[in-house]
Amino acid sequence: MSILPIIIGVILGVIVCRIWECMFWGVASLRKTKLTTCLKVLEHYHIGLYSLILSALLFEPISGVLLGLGLELIIEELLQHNPLAIGKDHFYTSSIIGGMLLIILLLVYLKMLL
């Protein structure tokens, strides 16, 4: 696997996070929409895990870009004030989604090994 697609994915991840930050936290109506709908439970790491799952299933160079994107989104989540929705009212729901995505990711990688 080449490093260039991974670096491109990380750069895309940084751009996506800055746009996400500006759109949801900079625009009051979008923030209210996110916090009052089912989108409230979605965290950066959910999209990151989904990207890692897709990266395991697709071919180069797309898989490398998705790998970099997924890793960047997970890192961004861990650097937040309340990572993994800890202390938020949707912590349990978010954790269930994250756990299911993690199990799927592990199963995909296990299938690749067998």
Image (cartoon, rainbow, N blue to C red):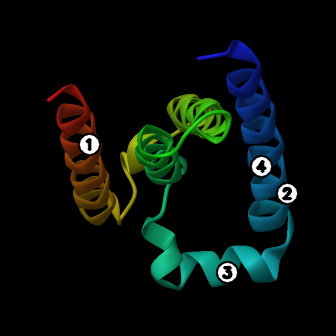
- Check disc 3 and report its element: helix, strand or loop: helix
Task: State the CA–CA distance, disc 3 to disc 1.
Answer: 36 Å
Identify the residue at horizontal 54%, vertical 84% (top origin).
Answer: 36
The image position of residue 22, as x and y in percent, is: 85, 57
**Disc 1 secondary structure class:** helix
Q: Between residues 92 and 112, which one lies in front from this camera angle?
A: 112
Tell me how far mark 1 sits from mark 2, CA to CA: 34 Å
Residue that appears at 29% across and 43% down: 105
Badge 1 density bin: few <14, some 14–19, many ≥20, Cα 10 Å: some
Q: Position of residue 40 (x, y in %)?
A: 50, 71
Q: Residue at x 71, y 73 (%)?
A: 31
Identify residue for label 4.
16
Which amino acid type corresponds to the residue marked 1 in the rendered image? Answer: Val
Q: Which mark is residue 22?
A: 2
Whole-angstrom CA distance, mark 4 to mark 3, is 20 Å
Give residue 14's quadrant in the image. top right
**Structural crowding at the residue carrying mark 3, measured as other residues with C-alpha within 10 Å and reported as few (<14), some (14–19) or many (≥20):** few
Front disc: 4 or 2: 4
Residue beneath disc 1: 108
